[in-house]
Image (cartoon, coloured by chain):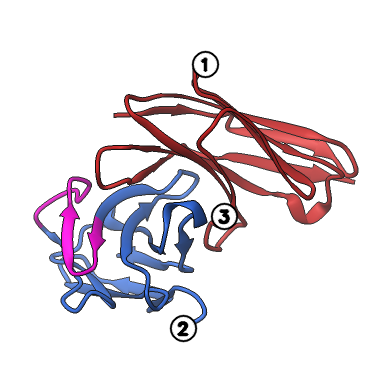
């Protein structure tokens, strides 16, 4: 099984940079996902990491260190619309490739 | 369709009533997942299909929960004799390949009264 840990809540200022961490424990790691979920809406895919390093996609970047069981999501030039829950999900290579989600980090962006 | 479609969007059920939740995945997506999400929590895995085969149902909380995908496209999650603890958002997700991530539907919010 997996144990996924991420902070419950974070606050940041519009225009700033914020880093949301995720640590996990798993056997047979097979990929880590970040999703954004606005209240009452479906989670939307942000990023996927399976190899160590940084993946950059516009204002959002995601980093993975498999040896440390650690990932972070970096959000730059924060906008008010970035206020949402950010979900870290880890997939074990058990054959059925089912992602297990953390509890999510609620990010509040204020002016 | 363009996205994953779930219906109904909201469902209120009296305790003891049976409910059926529908998921229309993206056309051609082989894998389909059902998750349960309680308020303020992350989605919890319920069951997984590859085409019509249910490969993993280890997350179904009790034998009152049943899922099917008879023709490998539309899936139905059925909950029998609903109880208050079943109140949650039920999310469906589908995927074509692992690299693309999983596309979620908007979910069905079930409230058992």
Q: Residue at x 41, y 62 (%)?
A: B95
Q: Is residue B58 magenta?
A: yes
Chain identifier, colour blue: B
Examine the rendering and report whether any part of residue A35 can be seen. yes
Q: Which residue is mark 1?
A: A68
Chain identifier, colour red: A
Residue A96, position in %: x, y?
26, 47
Left or right: residue B8 versus residue B71 is right
Q: Residue at x 52, y 62 (%)?
A: A42
Q: Which residues are magenta?
A: B48-63
Q: Residue at x 41, y 48 (%)?
A: B43
Q: Are marks 2 and 3 on the same chain?
A: no
Task: From this view, report whether residue B51 is shown above or below residue A93.
Answer: below
Cα separation, mark 2 vs mark 1, equals 40 Å
Q: Residues within 10 Å of mark 1 (few under 14, many from 20)?
A: few
Q: Which residue is mark 3?
A: A45
Q: Which residue is mark 2?
A: B1
Q: Are marks 3 and 1 on the same chain?
A: yes
Task: From this view, report whether residue A35 is shown above or below residue B83.
Answer: above
> Which chain is indicated by disc 3?
A
Q: Are marks 2 and 3 in contact (CB under 8 Å)?
A: no
Q: Residues within 10 Å of mark 2 (few under 14, many from 20)?
A: few
Q: Secondary structure at mark 3?
A: strand
């Amino acid at each position: 099984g997996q144990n996924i840990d991420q902070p419950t809540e974070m606050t940041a200022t519009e225009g700033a940079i914020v880093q949301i961490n995720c640590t996990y424990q798993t056997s047979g790691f097979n990929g880590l996902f970040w999703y954004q979920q606005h209240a009452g809406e479906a989670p939307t895919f942000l990023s996927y990491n399976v190899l160590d390093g940084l993946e950059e996609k516009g204002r959002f970047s995601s980093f993975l260190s498999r040896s440390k069981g650690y990932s972070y999501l970096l959000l730059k030039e924060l906008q008010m619309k970035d206020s949402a829950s950010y979900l870290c999900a880890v997939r074990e290579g058990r054959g059925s490739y089912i992602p297990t989600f953390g509890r999510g980090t609620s990010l509040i962006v204020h002016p | 369709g363009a996205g994953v479609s779930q219906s109904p969007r909201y469902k209120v059920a009296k305790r003891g009533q049976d409910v059926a939740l529908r998921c229309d995945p993206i056309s051609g997506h082989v894998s389909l997942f059902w998750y349960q999400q309680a308020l303020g929590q992350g989605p919890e895995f319920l069951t997984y299909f590859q085409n019509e085969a249910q490969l993993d149902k280890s997350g179904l909380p009790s034998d009152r929960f049943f899922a099917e995908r008879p023709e490998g496209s539309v899936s139905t999650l059925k909950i029998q004799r609903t109880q208050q603890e079943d109140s949650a958002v039920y999310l469906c997700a589908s995927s074509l390949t692992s690299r693309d991530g999983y596309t979620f539907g908007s979910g069905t919010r079930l409230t058992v009264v």
